[in-house]
Amino acid sequence: MSRSMNWVIPSLILCGLLIVGLAGSLMLFLSAKKEIRDLDRRFRLTRNEWGEKTETARLVLESHEAMIGKLESSIADTDRKIALINPSLPPMRGMNLNKRAEALRMARRGVDAEQISTYLHLPHGEVQLLLKIHGAMIESA
């Protein structure tokens, strides 16, 4: 009987190893499945958080765009009001040497200060001051 039982022990060992291998495979499969479920849950939570943050950012952007639109229209209104108040005056520039020389030439020809200021696009007060200073310098010389 011992000879006939020799085949049973290796078969039992083989079956035991097979059972241990299957149990290990089942454990790995179940732990992988649990890990996938946990990752999926975390992904959904993260996606929901990003969705909320994206929606908040979109709302903030829309409110800022509305404020910018209001500011732009306010600036346009202010520009229109400024143009209505004084549309004829060009931007103020300082009197350079060429304009000063031209103003003095025109004054020598007999053109009055108002016409000089209009022609050279200079403030009337600056032309009058230039002519007074030039007259005073001539008288003192």
Image (cartoon, helix red, strand yellow):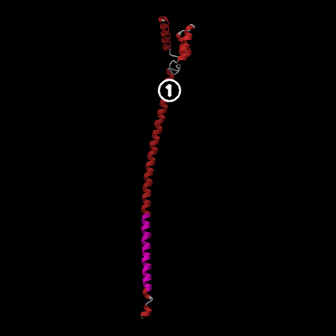
Q: Position of residue 103 (x, y in %)?
A: 54, 13
- Give the residues drawn in magenta, as a range: 10-35
Q: Nearer the viewer, residue 84 or 89?
A: 89
Question: Judging from the image, what secondary structure is the residue with disc 1 in?
Answer: helix
User: Is 113 in the magenta?
Assistant: no
Q: Amino acid at mark 1?
A: Asp
Q: Is residue 45 visible?
A: yes
Q: Position of residue 107 (x, y in %)?
A: 55, 9
Q: Main secondary structure of the magenta part?
A: helix
Q: Nearer the viewer, residue 25 or 108?
A: 108
- Position above or below: 101 against 62: above
Name the quarter where the N terminus is drawn. Answer: bottom left
How busy is the neighbourhood of tag 1: few (under 14 within 10 Å), some, or many (20 plus)?
few
Q: Position of residue 39 (x, y in %)?
A: 43, 61
Q: How many marks?
A: 1
Q: Is residue 121 visible?
A: no
